[in-house]
Image: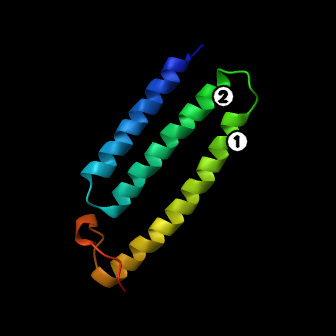
Amino acid sequence: MIGLESYLTVAAILFAAGIMAVLSRRNAIAVLIGIELILNAANVNLVAFDRFTNHGIEGQVFTLFVLAIAAAEAAVALAIILNVFDTRDRIDVDSVDDLRG
């Protein structure tokens, strides 16, 4: 049987990969992918702790909320990225210093 430590290790690797993607990338799409990795690491933790405790399905319910928030975040962020691309013809994070239209 897979123990809690294995789930926490996978979540830590996902979180570290997400942090590295957010901090090291200049492309806005890559930054969004890093944020999604961070949120998925949180989901793995929630489900793992829910599986190894006997308190019902709270971890799975919180995971559904996190997924819904991640979907909304992705939709809003992609809309902003498309707007920036229309005005500047590139989506370099460092070149976007304000959102004035």
- Which residue is found at the position 62% from the left and 54% from the top? 68
Looking at the image, tell me whether mark 2 or mark 1 is earlier in sequence order: 2
Task: Examine the rendered structure and indicate whether residue 26 appears above or below residue 4.
Answer: below
Image coordinates for residue 93, horizontal then vertical, percent = 28, 65
Residue matched to label 2: 50
Q: In the image, is 15 to the left or to the right of 54?
A: left
Residue closest to the far right: 56
Contact, mark 2 vs mark 1 (Cβ under 8 Å):
no
The residue under the point 51% across, 68% down is: 76
Position of residue 91 measured from the top left corner of the image (x, y, whole percent)? 30, 70
Separation (CA) of disc 2 from disc 1: 10 Å
The image quarter containing residue 14 is top left
As drawn, is 77 to the left or to the right of 4? Answer: left
What residue did someone put label 1 on?
A: 61
Q: Quadrant of the N terminus?
A: top right
Quarter of the figure that contains the C terminus: bottom left
Please tell me whether residue 80 is drawn above or below residue 21 in the rendered image.
Answer: below
Q: Residues within 10 Å of mark 1 (few under 14, many from 20)?
A: some
Residue 98 screen position, x and y as percent: 31, 75
Q: Residue at x 28, y 81 (%)?
A: 88
> Relative to residue 54, is residue 64 depicted above or below?
below
Horizontal placement of 21 versus 49: left or right?
Answer: left
Quick one: label 2, few (<14), some, or many (20+) residues within 10 Å? some
Q: Tag 2, which secondary structure?
A: helix
Kindly identify the amino acid type of the residue bearing the numbered disc 2. Answer: Asp
